Amino acid sequence: MYIEQELANIHVEGETLLTVGVFDGIHLGHQYLLRALIQQAEQKSLTSGVVTFNPHPQSILHPQEQTPWIITMEDRIKLLQQMNVKIIAVLSFTHKLAELSAKEFVHILQQHLRMRGLIVGPNSSLGRKREGNTELLHSLGNQMGFTVDIVPPFTIDGKTVSSTAIRQSLSQGDVATVKKLMGHAFTVNGKVVSAKKRGYKLGFPTANLDVAPNRALPCNGVYATISHVDGKQFASATNIGTQPTFGDGQIQMETHLVGYKGNLLGKNLGVTFIQRLRDEKQFASPQELQIQIMKDIEQVKIVERRKAQ
């Protein structure tokens, strides 16, 4: 089975304490659980480990309802490493994996990752048709010789922090709430690709990011952002939308870096969202759009000054 081949490639020193999940976003709720994992692993002289999946399970189980990623797999692994998780096992999520019973799945974890304990949230479930709820996991642990600890949900203002809540806030352009739930501002990284240079012709050159179609983005509109390139950062105005003034109709993300001089084409650019400025709108002429862009940039400068205070 392919899952066993993937796990066999992971070098494991000693017995492990694991958690299992998608962990999209590594938000404050995930961080709360991961800190419990690392702390308990140290107390029990076990190696901490995260078992996660790619692609998102929902994209396989319900392909008609594609779930956009909050962060890329590369960023997910980087953040897990920064939290000092010792083992990161990325499993290819397939229909075969989805058909494994909870018992079969945890047996594979015991066999290949030397699992001695499992830490999960109260609503976690493993195995075929999500049968492996916390009650069944406790039962399997007693039968198969591993511990199960349930970490309570992490809440803010009485509401559970979740990836779903973050996606919902992004869909509303509420980047302030996204920052609150993630513990840091929402950032999109990508390579700058060639475009039609309409911003350049208007006097405001923009960097068009090559963003994967399955990546979660704030809803269409103009945002005050901070752009990171070549080890420097610049105040920036970012537009997400279809460029209705020109009738393109295709979702794009383009950013104007205030004060940047040089060619961004082909460079890796990180765009951090600070504040939503306005809806995307159609203008009667490119000149009207030009005037609005000037106003947007002034707003960006105001936001940047406030942030610096």
Image (spheres, rainbow, N blue to C red):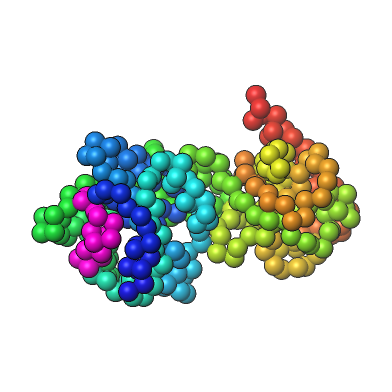
| Residue 62, position as x, y percentages in the image | 41, 73
Quadrant position of residue 307: top right
Q: Nearer the viewer, residue 102 or 160?
A: 102
| Residue 280, position as x, y percentages in the image | 70, 55
Residue 7 drawn in magenta: no
Q: Residue at x 36, y 75 (%)?
A: 95
| Residue 74, position as x, y percentages in the image | 52, 54
Q: Nearer the viewer, residue 108 or 26?
A: 108
Q: Is residue 21 visible?
A: no
> Relative to 39, is 82 on the left or the right?
right
Residue 105 drawn in magenta: yes
> Relative to 308, is 42 on the left or the right?
left
**For the C terminus, which image quadrant?**
top right
**For the N terminus, which image quadrant?**
bottom left
Q: Residue at x 48, y 51 (%)?
A: 76
| Residue bounds of the magenta highlight | 103-117
| Residue 232, position as x, y percentages in the image | 70, 38
Relative height, residue 6 to residue 154 (above, below): below
